[in-house]
Amino acid sequence: MQTSKQFKVAAVQAVPAFLDLRAGVAKAIDLIEQAARQGCKLVVFSETWLPGYPNQIWLGAPAWSMQFFGRYFENSLQAGGAEDQAIADAARRNNIQVSMGLSERDGGSLYIAQWHYAETGEVIKRRRKLKPTHVERTVFGEGDGSDLAVCETSIGRVGQLACWEHLQPLSKYAMYSQNEQIHCAAWPNLSAVSDEAYAYGPTVSGGASMIYAVEGGCFVIAACAVVGKEQQAMLCQGDPMKEAMCPTGGGFARIFAPDGRSIGANLDPHEEGLVVADIDLDLIPFAKASADPAGHYSRPDVTRLLFNNRPARRVEQFGSPVEYAPPVDPVRAAPAAPAEDT
């Protein structure tokens, strides 16, 4: 199925159109077109790039952040909706695969999702973050084992994870075991940088993407959003303490080779654009010759992973469907009295 082992890929570093789904989709299509014009075969967007990462959940109590929830819910995507179709059409028109990070609306719930579109516009995979991180659980639900998947595509075997899923050793191992070649890593803005929040900054998060490339023996395309002044003003409302926790910038998009090297130009944390790099899948066997943790470098007699990759359905229906029958009115159903002779 694979057509070429050498091609260009792109990681998006851009300001989302926060809480404006229509504008966000239009901007996404423009970035898809930019990547295609540069000859890229795959473009990767950051975590919940549509309709923007909900930084408000880190700035105050859940009750305070609920003031933004209604708009966030209404601007989240539904599978099969018009916005979904617009992204699929953009992938098809530009002959490029797209990994889109988004907030997925399903019924009354939201999920941190990544949707992978083929260059034909068909959906290769819709996945959800297995476990939202920390206060993300006040907004988003959980995925299941079927979301840890690597898919065969025309450019190679492609997988996706979001943010601190890259700090989950067993989830990573499940991905490595599927012979992943290209990994789409979706990160939010990495702007909460201080001594108190060092783990959320670019050193640790960027390091997680780099280590994933080395451990998995794969190419990692790590997309990252940027906090713009409008989003900061909306969420922080002039509060200096909130602004300190949600500064502008925070972009840290990178592309890592299987040896851990950062390839492609690095943008300034406040700059919007694409990080583009040439990748060559023929380099992967050489990387795995030294260490293949899910292959020859493993010790299954000592440690093994139990991996349930079946969907966790909320409702299991069984039995024959019951057809609806209207209730019987005892008065109307009673037989008519015989007419008396006159």
Image (spheres, rainbow, N blue to C red):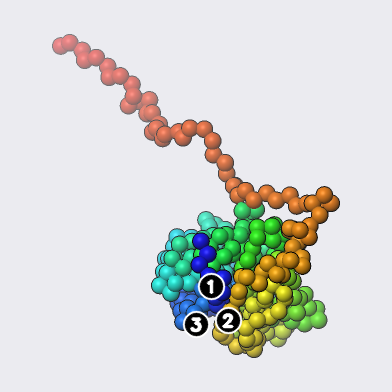
Q: How many numbered marks, from 0 up? A: 3
Q: Residue at x 76, y 61 (%)?
A: 293
CA–CA distance between discs 2 and 1?
10 Å
- The image shows residue 40 at horizontal and vertical percentages of 51, 77
Hey, what amino acid is under mark 3?
Answer: Gln
Hey, what amino acid is under mark 2?
Answer: Val
- The image shows residue 287 at horizontal and vertical percentages of 71, 70
**Is residue 230 shown to the viewer in this render?**
no
Name the one closer to the observer, 264 or 189: 264
Q: Which mark is residue 42?
A: 1
Name the one closer to the observer, 274 or 20: 274
Q: Which mark is residue 276?
A: 2
CA–CA distance between discs 2 and 3?
8 Å
Q: Residues within 10 Å of mark 2 (few under 14, many from 20)?
A: many
- Sequence-wise, the earlier of marks 2 and 1 is 1
Helix, strand or loop at mark 1: strand
- Sequence-wise, the earlier of marks 2 and 3 is 3
Name the one closer to the observer, 318 or 152: 152
- The image shows residue 37 at horizontal and vertical percentages of 46, 82
Helix, strand or loop at mark 2: strand
In the rendered image, which quarter is residue 225 located in?
bottom right
Q: Residue at x 64, y 51 (%)?
A: 309
Q: Residues within 10 Å of mark 1 (few under 14, many from 20)?
A: many
Hey, what amino acid is under mark 1?
Answer: Leu
- The image shows residue 72 at horizontal and vertical percentages of 55, 69
Q: Are marks 2 and 3 in contact (CB under 8 Å)?
A: yes
Q: Residue at x 65, y 60 (%)?
A: 179
Residue highlighted by disc 3:
38
In the rendered image, which quarter is residue 281 located in?
bottom right
Q: Are marks 1 and 3 in contact (CB under 8 Å)?
A: no
